[in-house]
Image (cartoon, rainbow, N blue to C red):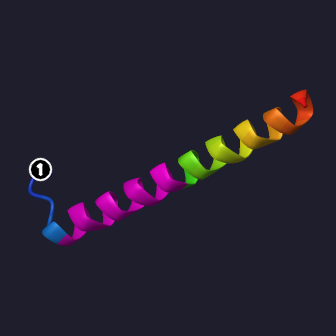
Amino acid sequence: SNNSSAVEIMAIDRFASDAIKMIMALNNYLEEKQTVNNA
């Protein structure tokens, strides 16, 4: 159904922001690792 509760929307929003943070952290980690390998 389309009328999602505010709680559901907040939960999805929190999940999305956590996922984005994890992806960004992983990205940083991989970039640092690559830099070490190239050095």
Q: Secondary structure at mark 1?
A: loop
Which residue ends up furthest to the front in the rendered image?
Answer: 39
Magenta highlight range:
7-21
Residue at horizontal 22 percent and vertical 61 percent from the top: 9
Residue at horizontal 88 percent and vertical 27 percent from the top: 38
Closer-to-camera residue (20/11): 20
Picture quadrant of residue 37 = top right
Residue at horizontal 65 percent and vertical 45 percent from the top: 28
Mark 1 Cα within 10 Å, few/some/many (few <14, many 20+)? few
Q: Amino acid at mark 1?
A: Asn
Closer-to-camera residue (13/27): 27
Percent of width and height locating residue 11: 31, 67
Q: In the rendered view, would you say 11 is above or below 29?
A: below
Percent of width and height locating residue 19: 49, 53
Residue at horizontal 60 percent and vertical 52 percent from the top: 25
Percent of width and height locating residue 10: 25, 66
Please give the residue where the numbered disc 1 appears in the rendered image: 2
| In the image, residue 10 lies in the stretch drawn in magenta | yes
Q: In the rendered view, would you say 38 is above or below 10?
A: above
Which residue ends up furthest to the top in the rendered image?
Answer: 38
Percent of width and height locating residue 21: 50, 55
User: Which secondary structure class fits the magenta region best?
Assistant: helix
Closer-to-camera residue (1/24): 24
In the image, taking residue 29 as reference, residue 11 lies left or right, namely: left
